[in-house]
Image (cartoon, rainbow, N blue to C red):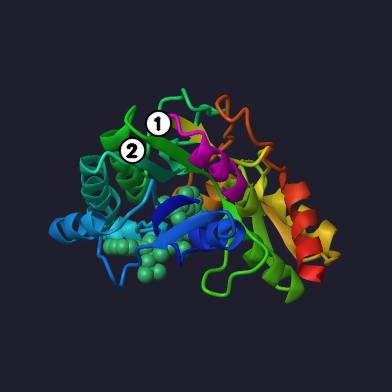
């Protein structure tokens, strides 16, 4: 069985990957309470001790708003932590996969594929891109976007936030003139399974098959789960960013390198989730 060591196995994305693939992959979790990836000596010692074929690096400082105030920590974890891990894994001549984000694009010149030039604006995105730059051409870099799943109590993704607001019949002001590319985490797991077995360095966008506006996304959640939309209103991107952190406006992310796994549209993902929640 292929041995995949990983950081971030308790997170939103990592925990589902392990859940779905652990019958066919031997996962070796390296949790934060056993290894702080910002400590280079500890990383080197730990990586030396464990036996694996591929290292999947998911751990990150993921708080986009927090990173604006905590710039140093975001860079320590996302750039320096990645460097520490890569150097230790490379010293053992093992393969490395880095999970990155569509936020490396500023959202002004869509669509974006793997050959598009990143221009990260917010601190979180800059720190993740700094991680990418250390690894480019040497390893697999996988960019994901707006990941969502059926269940995960520890962290609510955007889909479950929308659903909760609709179920509680709370007002929702949604941007109608921007785009996001929602990605079903189960698809990320199965596409990664292919890359584990067909490792070839490069950048891969493992993203949903269709971009949609946040307003359109809420309306789809309401349609699939049969919820009322009378308290959902539209706002413009400019109105939204006046009071909140700036997000990339047109995050229409596509792939020219993923010719191996068919990713779902948001509607297809929601239908699958509805099915998963019913069984
Ligand atoms: N969620 C998104 O919307 C999104 C979108 C695009 C890309 N991504 C990328 O996808 C990956 C997974 O994201 P996620 O949402 O699943 O993350 P998450 O739920 O926020 O989990 C982050 C993980 O990183 C670990 N971690 C944080 N600091 C660490 C440190 N100093 N040393 C060791 N481990 C540390 C955490 O460990 P503990 O649980 O022990 O604290 C946790 O397991 C990240 O690389 C993220 O940048 C996420």
Place residue 226 in its image quadrant.
bottom right
Seen at 32% across and 30% down, the residue is 138
Answer few, some or many: residues within 10 Å of disc 2's Cα (few below 14, many 20 plus, some between 14 and 19).
Answer: many
Tell me which segment is drawn in magenta: 189-200
Image quadrant occupied by the C terminus: bottom right
Q: Is residue 54 left or right of residue 263?
A: left
Q: Residue at x 39, y 56 (%)?
A: 6
Q: Main secondary structure of the magenta part?
A: helix
- Labels 2 & 1 near each other (Cβ < 8 A): yes
Please tell me whether mark 2 sits on a helix, a strand or a loop. Answer: helix
The answer to whether residue 244 shows anywhere in this view is no
Quickly name the residue at label 2. Answer: 132
Say which residue label 1 marks.
Answer: 118
| Residue at left offset 68%, top offset 71% | 164
In the image, residue 48 lies at what x, y percent? 22, 54
What x and y, as percent, mark residue 232? 74, 61
Which of the two discs, 2 and 1, labels the residue nearer the N terminus?
A: 1
């Amino acid at each position: 069985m292929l041995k995949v060591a990983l950081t971030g196995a308790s997170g939103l994305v990592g925990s589902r990957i392990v859940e779905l693939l652990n019958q066919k992959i031997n996962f070796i979790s390296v949790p934060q309470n056993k290894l702080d990836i910002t400590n280079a000596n500890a990383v080197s010692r730990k990586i030396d001790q464990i036996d694996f074929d591929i290292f999947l690096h998911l751990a990150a400082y993921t708080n986009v708003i927090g990173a604006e105030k905590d710039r140093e920590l975001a860079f320590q974890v996302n750039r320096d932590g990645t460097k520490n891990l890569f150097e230790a894994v490379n010293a053992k001549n093992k393969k490395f996969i880095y999970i990155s984000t569509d936020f490396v694009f500023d959202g002004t010149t869509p669509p974006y594929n793997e050959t598009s030039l990143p221009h990260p604006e917010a601190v979180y995105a800059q720190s993740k891109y700094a991680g990418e730059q250390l690894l480019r051409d040497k390893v697999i870099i996988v960019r994901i976007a707006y990941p969502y799943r059926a269940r995960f109590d520890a962290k609510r993704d955007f889909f479950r936030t929308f659903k909760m607001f609709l179920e509680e019949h709370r007002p929702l002001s949604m941007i109608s003139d921007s785009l996001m590319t929602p990605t079903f985490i189960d698809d990320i797991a199965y596409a990664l399974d292919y890359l584990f077995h067909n490792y070839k360095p490069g950048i891969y966008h493992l993203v949903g098959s269709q971009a949609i506006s946040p307003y359109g996304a809420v309306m789809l959640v309401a349609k699939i789960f049969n919820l009322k939309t009378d308290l959902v209103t539209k706002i413009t991107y400019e109105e939204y960013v006046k009071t909140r952190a700036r997000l990339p406006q047109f995050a229409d992310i596509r792939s020219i390198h993923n010719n191996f796994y068919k990713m779902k549209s948001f509607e297809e993902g929601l239908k699958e989730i509805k099915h998963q929640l019913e069984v």
